[in-house]
């Protein structure tokens, strides 16, 4: 019922406002952390840390074969693992959590718009500081971000490659024509449902159920010694 949904959203906003603010995200083992989900795969869940506003990658111990069920803009709680593995120089935002996140509610509206606006990646060079689809793992020093919320110059466009069935997101960023393997399962299901090889503009918005305002780009964990650029989310404005 509508009144129940409205009541739940009001309670979620109140909960978010009650979270003590801090300048840096908590990384202490055993600490409770709260995040706003903006992308979730079996490899990690990307959240905006609600205490600090920082962009973080939670490594969640999903059971083998279990796909993430976390919705876009879910407010979730997790506990940092005893061994948080927070020293990955290719993914400096990554931290391991002890168990599956607890879902608290859904956040919408101006609060989400503000949080997203505060973390948009600057357009001051190529994505993640290098051109091309990947970079050797041993080149990273913990100085580059490994996840970014992008406002793109052109697109995005969702594409299906018939030769292997893979799904890609194409967009323009910093004068580059960027193609990223799509790991956003909701986007993959959307193009599956249309049985088309490409979606853009109004057709893409209809298939997704929203107009994508941002592209969430991430660097993968090493594959044959290289970290690859991927798309882990198409994000609405709020």
Image: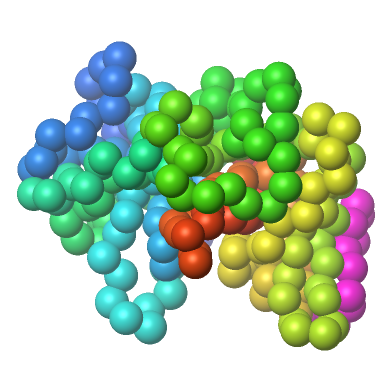
Question: In this rendering, does residue 73 appear at all?
Answer: no
Instruction: Specify whether residue 123 is in view.
Output: yes
Where residue 166 sits: x, y (%)? 72, 76
Q: Is residue 31 above or below residue 208?
A: above
Q: Residue furthest top?
A: 23
Q: Nearer the viewer, residue 53 or 109?
A: 53
| Residue at image coords 81%, 30% | 174
The magenta stretch spans which residues?
Answer: 193-206
Left or right: where 195 falls relative to 105? right
Q: Where does the C terminus fall, quadrant-wise?
A: top right
Q: How is the image coloured?
A: rainbow
Q: How far from the left and from the top, in percent, is residue 196?
A: 89, 77
Asked if residue 200 is among those painted magenta in the image, a careful observer would answer yes
* Residue 2 falls left or right of residue 64: right
Q: Count the labels in the image.
A: 0
Q: Is residue 24 left or right of residue 53?
A: left
- Quadrant in which residue 191 is drawn: bottom right
Q: Residue at x 66, y 63 (%)?
A: 182
- As displayed, is residue 218 above or below residue 153? below
Residue 172 magenta: no
Q: Position of residue 43 (x, y in %)?
A: 41, 62
Q: Residue at x 38, y 83 (%)?
A: 65
Name the residue at 71% across, 20% down: 124
């Amino acid at each position: 019922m509508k009144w129940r949904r409205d009541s739940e959203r009001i309670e979620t906003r109140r909960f978010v406002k009650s979270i003590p603010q801090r300048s840096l995200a908590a990384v202490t083992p055993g600490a409770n952390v709260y995040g706003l989900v903006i992308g979730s795969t079996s490899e990690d869940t990307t959240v905006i840390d609600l205490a600090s506003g920082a962009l973080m990658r939670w490594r969640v111990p999903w059971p083998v074969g279990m796909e993430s069920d976390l919705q876009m803009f879910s407010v979730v709680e997790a506990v940092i693992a005893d061994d948080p593995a927070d020293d990955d120089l290719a993914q400096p935002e990554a931290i391991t959590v002890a168990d599956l996140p607890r879902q608290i509610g859904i956040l919408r509206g101006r609060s989400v718009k503000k949080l997203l606006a505060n973390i948009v990646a600057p357009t001051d060079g190529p994505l993640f500081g290098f051109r091309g689809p990947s970079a050797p793992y041993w080149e990273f020093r913990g100085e580059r971000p490994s996840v970014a919320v992008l406002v793109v110059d052109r697109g995005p466009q969702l594409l299906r490659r018939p030769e292997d069935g893979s799904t890609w997101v194409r967009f323009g960023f910093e004068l580059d024509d960027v193609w990223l393997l799509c790991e956003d399962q909701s986007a993959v299901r959307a193009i599956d449902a249309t049985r088309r090889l490409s979606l853009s503009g109004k057709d893409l918005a209809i298939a997704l159920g929203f107009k994508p305002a941002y592209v969430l780009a991430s660097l993968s964990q090493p594959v044959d010694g290289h970290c690859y650029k991927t798309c882990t989310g198409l994000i609405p404005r709020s």
